[in-house]
Image (cartoon, rainbow, N blue to C red):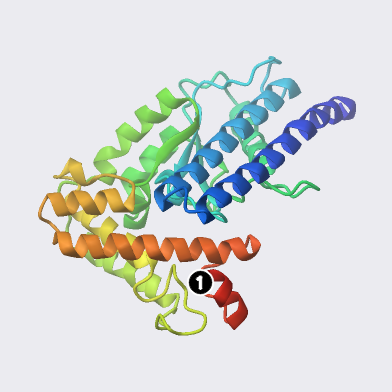
Amino acid sequence: TMEAAGAIEGKLTEPMRAMRLAKEASHAAIAAADLAGIWSLDEVVGRLTDLADASVKSAMRLAIRTAWASGSLGETRASDEMPGLFALAMGKMGARELNYSSDVDLIVLFDLDVLPVSGARVKEGMLRLTRDLVRIMEERTADGYVFRTDLRLRPDPGSTSLAISTQFATSYYESVGQNWERMAHIKARVCAGDAQVGAGYLKELEPYVWRRHLDYWAISDIHSIKRQIHSHGQHAELDSPDFDVKLGRGGIREIEFFTQVQQLILGGRRPELRAPQTKIALAAMANADIVDPVVVDDLCRSYDFLRSVEHRIQMLNDEQTHHLPDVAEKRSAVAI
């Protein structure tokens, strides 16, 4: 009924407010420790990721509780658990390298054999639950928002539901999965929900992500990903007024791409190269004599510097931007 829906909605208001205030306070504390030089870049991005993990866990529990309370799953329970349902953190969040203004990239999955919901209710129920999770995270209220949430890294996002079954996902990746999706899964980890089912699913995907042999087409496809990065066109040199520290020539994305290409090509036969964190993966390549240690040291120092600049740019006004400001005054603020 409308009354019941209103009552359930009312129960979300207070936790949503608490999440927004907690995020604001945490961000302020992290930024203070960052600017004072108390924490290193690794510590800062780790703490920002911890905050995102805690937020997604809370949002998922709230969304599950709402779904059970509504009766739309076929029965009513007072529970915030849903066996078989989990979220994968991807991208920067998956690698525990989150920025101040990062979106969180998630894939929401459920195992049909474990989920305590069956039949026609599954698809609609999981879709509604995932919509609630996203709304809890990103709806802008008087207290702001928690994190912008992006679900577009899931299989075939143009035609699939926001939450998909592990059975569908596994067969999709094995039959039509792209190399960029393999690359994305280097950083995948379970961040909320049923950790055991999630770990089993990632284990099942390992032969797809970490191939022992790559054919000519796979290599040429990797080249095309590189061309796509360049086609974003930020070829401005480092001293240009609005240099893009993420996508520009020699920027963050190029260091990440270099690392992930080595991982895609060699990781199937060399498990020690499979680290999701860029610098840890680079260090493993130096240890294995794949990349010259001097080059790795240079890349890691450049990566740290560019990530620090990116953070300062984003601190200016909580914007997801990677361009150096073109106004001299703001550039000075970043430099300080």
Q: Is residue 239 above or below residue 333?
A: below
Residue located farthest toward the left when viewing the structure as drawn: 289
The quadrant in which residue 56 appears is top right
Q: Which residue is mark 1?
A: 335
Residue 136 at what x, y percent from top left? 69, 39
Residue 63 at what x, y percent from top left? 66, 31
What residue appears at the point 43 percent right and 70 percent down from the top-left corner? 247
What residue appears at the point 17 percent right and 63 percent down from the top-left corner? 294
Residue 246 at what x, y percent from top left? 44, 67
Q: Does residue 154 appear in this view?
A: no
Quarter of the image with the N terminus is top right
Q: Is 123 in front, or is 292?
A: 292
The quadrant in which residue 131 appears is top right
Give the secondary structure at mark 1.
Answer: helix
What residue appears at the point 70 percent right and 42 percent down from the top-left corner? 20
Identify the amino acid type marked 1.
Answer: Ala
